[in-house]
Amino acid sequence: MARGATNAVGLDIGADAIKAVQLRKTGNGLQVVGRPGYVLTPPGSVSGGVVVDEEAVAGTISQMVRDCGFTTKDVVASVGGTTSVTVRVVTMPRMSGAELSDAMDYELDRQVPFPIDQVIYDYQIIESADGGQGDEMSVLLAAAQEDTVNAHIAAITGSGLRPIHIDIEPLAVGRALVNISTNGYGQQTVAIAHIGASQTEMSILRNGVLEFVRAIPTAGEAFTTAIRQELGVDLQQAEQAKRQFADTRDLDSIETDDSEQVKQAKRAVQQAISGPLFELATELGRTLDFYRRQHGGEEIKRLLLSGGSAVIPGLADFLTTETGVDAEVAYPYKYLLCDADELSEAYLRDVGPATCVALGLAMRDMLPE
């Protein structure tokens, strides 16, 4: 699809859930078409970000497309995962295009933990604040195992859709939360913690440009595992308890309509996930400190939370306290045109954090360079 395309579905295939959003570019802005999709991934069909059961995933996508009322077959998808995708921002001596191409072969061998003859990769120079006058430059490098990309493509084509781009999650979530925003984030230094199933992807953007990426292994699955071990329940029961009862707030100091039985369940889950929560907060804080040290004490204005686990009640306040940076749960749909009769604000706020990657993928060719 050429730059400037005006209609696409963003598709985020995760281990826990498959998310999809269709956007159409209009004269008044980007419009949500149909209903944002969020369906549970067929058990065992995606592992570590890799599609291992193409037929099951394809069937789920096909049904979701019908249910959501999407009107285009053009899809921008992402690849992710802990073992098959590498995203790095590397610092290199400033050099020309031909020299950079040769140098990236060396960087690929140094940065990628799997055989480089089995990867698909791309890179992009990050424009620096000095206007390209310094002796060094930063380059965004993304590499994925070829089998991983091919499995994604097979699942998409098997669903009857047409893959037109494969992108990476940090760029997508940055578009959805920073590049399209109208509240000044594009002129600030902003951190994003995308809390997925198997990892939390930490991104830092300065003036709308991705400058730093780090994968933190503590994420949704760590919470589920902690609940299962603490409460002695199976994996399915632990996942249900996390979705229903996870809460980081002081339950004795807030007014709710919860029964005492529900409060007891929340306390039990709260106790179970306290370890992974503090571990996540610690790693986020360390990452923010590292970035500041590398950038002369750069002030980070905001920590935006996305991903399925971002909606845990009280999480933003908890991370604000622990990291010292104001945190908020992402609500990307406030920048988009939505049919209020079809999509309530409550629903969009609920699915917003989980569908940030899908939104950013859909808008890949719709935002200015």
Image (spheres, grey):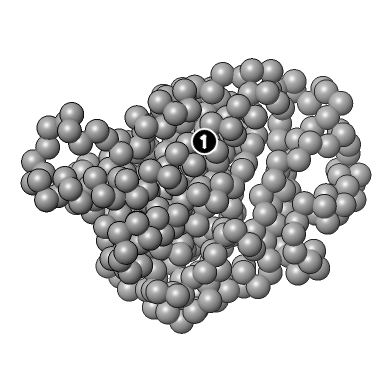
Which of the 4 image quadrants contains residue 38? bottom left
Which of the 4 image quadrants contains residue 238? bottom left
Closest to the observer, 56 or 127: 56
Residue 24 is situated, as x and y percent measured from the top left of the image, at 40, 50
Q: Which amino acid does label 1 sit on?
A: Thr
Question: Quadrant of the image for the C terminus?
Answer: top right
Residue ID at (42%, 79%): 56
Tag 1 residue: 282
Residue ID at (10%, 46%): 260
One can see residue 22 in this view: no
Q: Is residue 301 left or right of residue 39?
A: right
Residue ID at (57%, 59%): 81
How many residues crowd around disc 1 within 10 Å: few (fewer than 14), some, or many (20 or more)? Answer: some
Q: Is residue 142 above or below residue 330?
A: below
Residue ID at (87%, 34%): 93
Residue 331 is situated, as x and y percent measured from the top left of the image, at 34, 38
Does dot 1 land on a helix, a strand or a loop?
helix
Q: In this view, does 64 lie above or below 55?
A: above
Residue 314 is situated, as x and y percent measured from the top left of the image, at 30, 35
Q: How many labels does the image show?
A: 1
Q: Is residue 346 left or right of residue 302?
A: left
One can see residue 223 in this view: yes
Question: Quadrant of the image for the N terminus?
Answer: bottom right
Residue 74 is situated, as x and y percent measured from the top left of the image, at 48, 63
